[in-house]
Image (tube, rainbow, N blue to C red):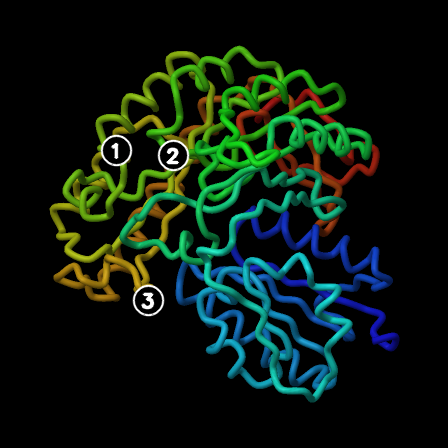
Amino acid sequence: MEQVKTVAFHTLGCKLNFSETSTLSRLLEQDGFVKTDFDNTADVYVINTCSVTDNADKECRMLVRRIQRRAPESMVVITGCYAQLKPEEIASIEGVDLVLGAAEKFNIAEHLKALTKGDSTKICSCDIEDVNTFHASYSLNDRTRTFLKVQDGCDYTCAFCTIPMARGKSRSDSVANVVEHAHTLAATGVKEIVLTGVNLGDFGKGFEGGKKREETFFELAQELDKVEGISRYRISSIEPNLLSNEIIEFVASSRKFMPHFHIPLQSGSNDILGLMRRRYRRELYADKVALIKQFMPHCSIGVDVIVGFPSESEAHFRETYDFLHELDVSYLHVFTYSERANTGALDIQPVVPVNIRHERNKILRNLSHKKMQFFAEQHLNQTRKVLFESLNKEGMMEGYTDNYIKVTTPFRQEWHNQIIDWELR
């Protein structure tokens, strides 16, 4: 493999995938590879996949075809959730050389050494029940905000979700290790860390020295708050039933944890939440939002919501719309339900027609736009702290306030990775 010098990466999906791609990149660079842009010709292409929707699967196949046209002699490696769930399907795609499941992706350098272009596609995967180790990951030099993976896997069995099948049981790093990573990142000049995981509120599960570890996300937050050099933390996403009142109160009093929560809802109808096998009802969700706003009226709250879940009637959708319309939240991430193999939702009838799913998605995206506008307008003429990112976009640069309002201004190099007092206009 001495001839392999350059490697290019493409990430599909969530912040967790971004953190893992960055770690894979560092592993290969330590092994002598030179990273290049995905649009360039490279000796090896690595696609880190998602499989939350069928669009993610389709995008993976499209990317492989593009590589085949541009660089047919290059190695193509597929890893991530799609690779764990459907390795044989991926192996059948022309041009794919290596498929790495959840247990093998961090051994990518060793697998590449044993690979020759033209060999039959190699699949390195195992049953997800055998995946029980935690691999720490963080993004670095890719974005101003660093994504730090502290938890992986999920013990929930939501009817729409394949993630437990793709990532295994819930497990996490130790508080001590996460704090050590935060110190390492602080030494590189990182100002903001986004804590990521599959089920972040479930942090603490794991084994150390053969013994079961009992730690909590609240304990992790308390220790991270003490790390010198890191100015900001964000919690990427946390289930409403795991967002304890003590975490909310802690964020309200913290200097470093930003007034910003992203809390999955999925549906505003208790009937649909039950069918989804979610572990809460809308009343608990509303209580959490009310408590957050009691302690932090300026706090930004993002919401995940799924439209078109099987049996979602017009009345159910109207429940969701009205619930979100009245709720004091800031923006929505709207997902159109997509059938996923081996999930419980496939047994639920009636199926919502695809065109109606898309109509409902559009309606909620419009609501999200209004929510974002209203939230931003509430803060006009206020001065808030903005962390500016380095990217020069046609003479402009972007940053986010502590409470996640996006700011765009003419590019100034000296503001890169700096926190600036900014009057919102």
Tell me which corner region of the image, top left, top right, bottom left or bottom right, holds residue 188. top right
Residue bearing mark 1: 280
* Residue 122, horizontal then vertical, whole percent: 61, 78
In this orientation, does residue 195 appear? Answer: no
| Residue lying farthest to the front in this orientation | 210
| Residue lying farthest to the bottom in this orientation | 118
Residue bearing mark 3: 341
Residue under the image location 83 percent in, 55 percent down: 30
**Side of 46 relative to 151 (left or right):** right
Q: Amino acid at mark 2?
A: Glu
Q: Amino acid at mark 3?
A: Ala
Secondary structure of the residue carrying tag 1 is: loop
Rounded to the nearest angstrom, the CA distance separating label 1 from label 3 is: 25 Å
Residue under the image location 50 percent in, 14 percent down: 250
Residue bearing mark 2: 239
Rounded to the nearest angstrom, the CA distance separating label 2 from label 3 is: 24 Å
* Residue 217, horizontal then vertical, whole percent: 50, 26
Neighbor class of circle 2 (other Cα within 10 Å; few <14, some 14-19, many 20+) is some
Q: Is residue 379 above or below residue 181?
A: above
